[in-house]
Amino acid sequence: MTGATIDKPARRRLGVGAAIILVLVLAAVSVVIGIVRSAGATGSAGERIALATGAPQLPAVYVHVYGAVVHPGLYRLDEGARVVDVIAAAGGLTPEADRTAVNLARRLTDGEQLRLPAVGEAPGSGTVGASGAPPGIASDGRVNLNTADVAALDTLPRIGPALAQRIVQWREDNGAFTSVDDLLSVPGIGDKMLDGLRDLVTV
């Protein structure tokens, strides 16, 4: 009977000790898991930042290309672009284009007007205005709101055939544009669009 009385406290102390050790082990494991998770999160954040960091965008150049290209018009390219780049942007050369008439490797300049001639046609030939530019296009490559037809206006960014027709109709109904700001009177053109067109058009 006495031996049994002594064993119970011993067992109780043993149980308490084992419970304490188990708690300590679990706490240590939790700390280790927390450290590992924290290190992993820091690595992920670092990767996201690295991916988000990119090279600065190059300044843009605007080039008006027409003639023997699939989609004549005004194109915006990165600075340093070459003739071959604007031809590609315009859908490539037409079958009748004279592929030897221009230097494809030449760098483009902002505001340049580039004409691609057909075979047997001189580079400077074609229907042009008094300034040497196509009708509706000023000598500096900008679209003249008072002389441009629907096709010339359609080369402007965000101006489709319908909106180009509205510009021509406004001109017929109200007379010549006296300022680029008059475009705000044309249905469908707001301040944001005007800001994008301001440097590309003239009166």
Image (tube, rainbow, N blue to C red):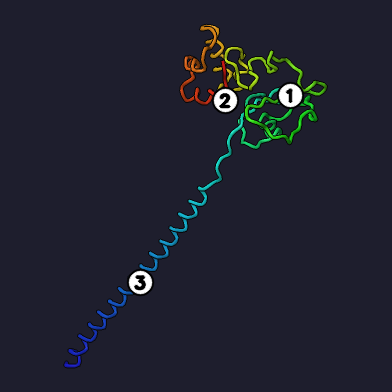
Q: Is residue 9 left or right of residue 81?
A: left
Task: Give the Cα separation between the discs numbered 3 and 2.
Answer: 64 Å
Q: Amino acid at mark 3?
A: Ala
Q: Looking at the image, is 176 positioned above or below residue 2?
A: above
Q: Amino acid at mark 2?
A: Pro
Q: Residue at x 59, y 33 (%)?
A: 60
Which residue is identified by label 2? 157
User: Is disc 2 surrounded by few (<14), some (14 to 19) or many (20+) residues within 10 Å?
Assistant: some
For marks 2 and 1 on the same chain, the one whose residue lies earlier in the sequence: 1
Task: Give the Cα separation between the discs numbered 2 and 1.
Answer: 21 Å
Judging depth in this view, the residue of 87 and 64 nearest the camera is 64
Q: Amino acid at mark 1?
A: Ala
Q: Nearer the viewer, mark 1 or mark 3?
A: 1
Q: Secondary structure at mark 3?
A: helix
Q: Secondary structure at mark 2?
A: loop
Q: Residue at x 66, y 14 (%)?
A: 135
Q: Is residue 151 left or right of residue 195?
A: right
Q: Looking at the image, is 34 positioned above or below residue 190?
A: below
| Spot occupied by residue 119 in the image (x, y as percentages of width and height) | 81, 24
Residue 28's mark?
Answer: 3
Q: Secondary structure at mark 1?
A: loop
Q: Is residue 64 left or right of residue 167?
A: right
Residue 196's mark?
Answer: none
Which residue is identified by label 1? 68
Judging depth in this view, the residue of 170 and 197 nearest the camera is 197
Going by the picture, which residue comes out furthest to the bottom? 2
Q: Residue at x 78, y 24 (%)?
A: 96
The answer to which image quadrant residue 129 occupies is top right
Judging depth in this view, the residue of 141 and 71 nearest the camera is 141
